Amino acid sequence: MEKPMEWTEQAEDAIAKVPFFVRKKVRKRVEKEAAQTGKNQVTLGEVKATQTRFLSGMDAEIKGYQVETCFGSEGCPNRIASADDLVEQIEALFKQEDILSLLRQQVKGDLKFHHEFRVAVAQCPNGCSQPQIKGIGIISAARPGVTEEACIGCGACVDACQEGAIALTGDGEQPEIDFDRCLMCAKCVKACPTGTLATATQGYRVQLGGRLGRHPRLAMELPGIHTQTQVIEIVKQCIRFYREKSRHGERFSNLLTRAEFEKMVQK
Ligand code: SF4
Ligand code: SF4
Ligand code: SF4
């Protein structure tokens, strides 16, 4: 296995100052360039040199969209289910739609990373890829249900639920789920030794229109849990909407007002 690259404290401080939306890319690039010159440690000098090269050639790096994922696929115990296939499908869709050409026609001057259409996929409600502040945020979800299997009243589900969404009722052997609190993380299902709790519906929550910047806003959530096919349809709908409304390469989140979102929900 390849040894991870070491970073000096000064190099870490310098990378922490790179704007967050390009930090991951610059970090990867620094490591790649350091490795190519046979180094196993990144110093301040390497960060500065790569950063300058990267920022001066930014236009060539832009692909018109970014699909960010969390680290769920790298063995995170909180992951509900793999979203790798969905991510591939979304990437393919954006490539096919050629948003980059649209942006090049609409934006005067060089394209910047903030022009790109941003999508984030998180494989549990912890949302490490920050779906709440992206144009389209997708979160894996597993809605629990109570099966016919007898409950032994062990309380493991109550302990596992960080939301306080489960109570044992009756004589302490009947789990009851408060779906107003439940974030559909499947932790109770994983904890239940008897199968009394099982996943009733699995899919994705979808949030739209989140952003940071001058007028930050958390994304608005579409109701329900969506299948992979439905998520792809929603992404297509968002791209169509963007094509219709964008005039100067505005961000999708700025175009999607609350009223436009409500219209989308009703469709
Ligand atoms: S969002 Fe969940 S599954 Fe993904 S890395 Fe974070 S904790 Fe793990
Ligand atoms: S799915 Fe998660 S949030 Fe919902 S009841 Fe189970 S542990 Fe609690
Ligand atoms: S974890 Fe399962 S068996 Fe234990 S109290 Fe909860 S539902 Fe009952």
Image (tube, helix red, strand yellow):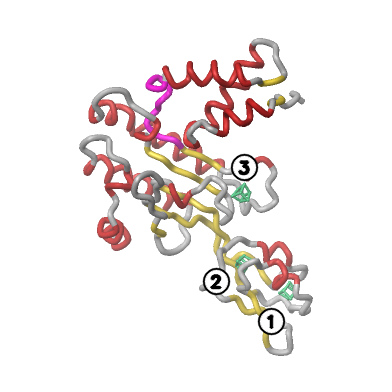
Query: In the rendered view, would you say 216 is above or below 143?
Result: above
Quickly name the residue at label 1. Answer: 168
Q: Picture coordinates of residue 112 (x, y %)?
A: 36, 28
Q: Amino acid at mark 3?
A: Phe
Q: Picture coordinates of residue 128 (x, y %)?
A: 57, 48
Q: Amino acid at mark 1?
A: Leu
Distance, label 1 to label 3, CA atoms, is 34 Å
Q: Picture coordinates of residue 227 (x, y %)?
A: 48, 55
- Queried on whether the Cβ of the residue with tag 1 lies below 8 angstroms from ligand 3, the answer reads yes
- Queried on whether the Cβ of the residue with tag 2 lies below 8 angstroms from ligand 2, the answer reads yes
The magenta span reads 58-66
Distance, label 3 to label 2, CA atoms, is 25 Å
| Residue name at image x 78 percent, y 78 percent | 152
Quickly name the residue at label 3. Answer: 71
Compare residues 263 and 259 and report the one nearer the observer: 259
Distance, label 1 to label 2, CA atoms, is 15 Å
Residue at the bottom extreme, as displayed: 171
Q: Picture coordinates of residue 132 (x, y %)?
A: 46, 52
